[in-house]
Amino acid sequence: MFEDLQAGQHQRTHSPRQSYPPQDSAATIQPDTSLTPPASNDSNDQEMRHNFTPPSPQDEGPERQPTPEPELPQHHKTFHPHLTDPWAPFADQVAFCMANLLFKQMEASKADIDEIMECWSLSLMGTDRTGPFSDHDHLFNSIDAIPFGSAPWKCFQTADDPTLPPTAPSWMKERYQIWYRDPDVVIANMLSKPDFAGEFDTRPYVHLGADGKRRWSEFMSGNYLWNHAGAMYVPIIVGSDKTTISVMTGNVKYHPLYAMIGNIHGGAQRAHRNGVIPIGFLAIPKADRQYDGDVAYRNFKRQLYHESIASILRPLKPAMEVSVVLIYDLAAYIADYPEQVLLAGVVSEWCPKCTALSSDLDGLNARPRSQEYTEKLSNEFGDESVEMMASDLLHQLIKGTFKDHLVDWVGEYLELTEGSTRAKEIMDDIDCRIAASPQFPGLRRFPQGQRYKQWTGDDSKALMKYVEDDVSNALPRFIDFCYLARKSDITEDTLVDMQAALTRFTPTHAMKHYFDNIVAFGPPNSLCSSITESRHIIALKKPWRRSNRYNVRLDKLHTLYADLVFRNLLPPSHAPRPEPFDGGDEDEGPFPLAMYSRDLYELAVDVDQPTLPELTRRFLYEQLHAGDVIPDNIDDCPHIDSNVYVHHSAIAYFYAPSDISGIRGMKRERIRSTPSWYRYPRRDCALVVEDADKPGFHGMSVVRILLFFSFTQSGVEYPCALVHWFNRYGARPDPKTGMWMVKPDNRGRDSREPYLSVVHLDSLFRGVQLLPVFGPDPLPKDFHYSDTLDAFDAFYVNKYVDYHAYEMIFKNLTCLKFDQGKTVERGKSIHSTYFAGTVNGQSDA
């Protein structure tokens, strides 16, 4: 069907495979692929590594003798042997850094590069030195001369069919071009990169937690790979996501085909470190509207799609069939539902994974779908291309079930039960309530509620974090399922929780396949189409607007940079950790930091907090006399004569086991307390750890930050926060929403005097968002979100504000022992302990 536009036959080109990631040294034991493996006798986690014995080509059948396990290179720094100068082909470090800055980071135009180089040369006039490059051509040629990291683009096109009649439609006679890169070269480049050292699994494994239960954390922990492993196993993950891109070949449009390998950890895949590479652009046939329902046209599109993918992947076939030390396997396919239908060869509204009828998706007689519907891919790559289709969090849950099902269902339900006019009034009030939600770091606000023209995946994710208690009991259970399914570490208990959530609302058919897919492929978060969608701008749209060589040059620069980092010649390209008190990105309004008085008593007048001096002196007594009872007489507490410095924000660092990038490390979060944030006051809320021995929210309380400040006493700096406490309402979360409820701790005769105290910044765990308990009355149309925390008497602690809040606070996890901090109890002394999050104060004076 296709003819190659390149001269000669298809050649397999390999990059040096000398920098394999280190072989796992865990002991090899017999696997138990069931969900309930034998309990571990060790208190620590265990991993069963697949024991492979690669056969020789002449050894066939069940009687063949096992051969010794091949020795893979151990973990050491192996450099490219053809490089004698680490900066080559660049003259020196300055030349490489300048090329990386201009081409990759600044994306400077040719004219700008020429002007910069000319100014550089002028500055050196009269000396014997020259600039790193003479012009843009010199810079581009230097990048092109990098001898590794390259996978050039090639092209093939459909061949003419001489049997077509003259009256055949144009879409049958057109010659479609498919651009591609040799996937064998792309994967060889991935395997040779030191950039993935420490984030690479050489063999499938079964992970047992300390409790002896099964865990799934990476792609290589799934049953599917365990059952297919042999030699050093390299599972290839392919994904396609249609997004039309016009390139140099006229008006022909394509949609990208991506490749990645399952050995690389999910965090590295999502971190834009060249672990997800575009390997092709699939043609999109065009036809007049009269052919929209034409069976021949649909079959043509399906055939072109399958033939294109099979032709692009054909260079991998030898390494998938021949038993060698390194063996490839087409393991998983990432696609949204329309592409799954096209790949499986089924009709829309059918399930691509099983034989359930569209009219009875919940039928009990459905079986795994046969491969006869995908005959072309079956002939090329085996009989499992249906089995390898992964669950898609983005399109199946976030966009599909949430936006297209639940949100639309709520509107239809209200119209049926309340009538059109009343339904619109209720929906308007829901929009007002969503808009009244207080601000939170990283959370998108919806000033018009959910009324906007175009929904994106990010819009749906953000809107899921606003839970209305009066909308539907099913909505919190569905969001529970979503938050559990997207975890980076899934255990048997997680599957039980997912099943419990599933039974409390009517699920879509696709959600029922999540359990088998998790067992087979590991966490869905590692196979989500958001991974490929996030690569569009970086890897496709921007490069193709500029040049078809742009992608290749980016790959070369990235590979050389990673090699130089591996040699310790360049630092890793990570942003430096900011100071705990971060003054950046501030809207100071009428009170710039310099205008606050540095005298404690005068500052109390400035911020209208008359009890600030007394509370601060009691706080200092607690710090100096840990465990002692605070004296009633304020005169027995030390005086504070040093300067006091006000801060409008602080930076929290806490351990994030479900970090969206998969790094499971320290997350940075800004907590604000400022009189003017985009013209309105903003006083964020935070969690204070009162008892580190109690799990989750049972050992925490909510406070509202009224002031960040610091002072020095006897040479010791004390970063502090003036806080208003909230009391927990009820002994357990609200049964309707699943969220804890709190009320402001107000005392005095009329219960309007807020209970305040000064706490050490280390006692703050992280920020938290409170959602008002609105009640039955509608919200005024002119209500502003900056008044929310002052206007309501009760609040929900929003467990859906981000994945970390859901997992660490509300899933009864005991505080993790990572960074030293402090716990605090109201009226009691502060004592040292260990818990997951700290905020370290530092004066910016």
Image (tube, rainbow, N blue to C red):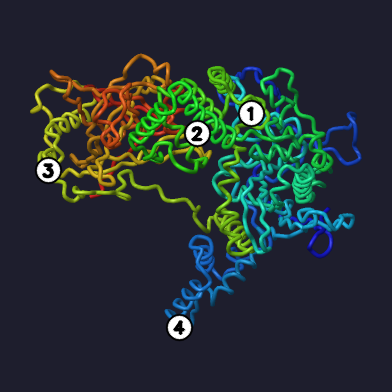
Depth check: give the residue in front, 143 or 788. 788
Instruction: Check whether the beta carbons of the residues at disc 1 and disc 4 lie within 8 A of each other.
Output: no
Q: CA distance from mark 2 to mark 1?
A: 24 Å
Disc with the residue nearer the chain's start (3 vs 2): 3
What type is the residue that disc 3 sits on?
Asp
The residue where tag 1 is placed is: 510
The residue where tag 3 is placed is: 599
- The residue shown at (44%, 41%) is 452
Camera-nearest label, 3 or 2: 2
**Residue 677: which quarter of the image?**
top left
The residue where tag 2 is placed is: 658
- Residue 701 in view in this figure: no
- Give neighbour class at mark 1: few <14, some 14-19, many 20+ (Cα, 10 Å): some
Q: CA distance from mark 4 to mark 2?
A: 56 Å
Instruction: Check whether the beta carbons of the residues at disc 2 and disc 1 lie within 8 A of each other.
Output: no
Camera-nearest label, 1 or 3: 1
The residue where tag 4 is placed is: 127
- Give neighbour class at mark 2: few <14, some 14-19, many 20+ (Cα, 10 Å): many
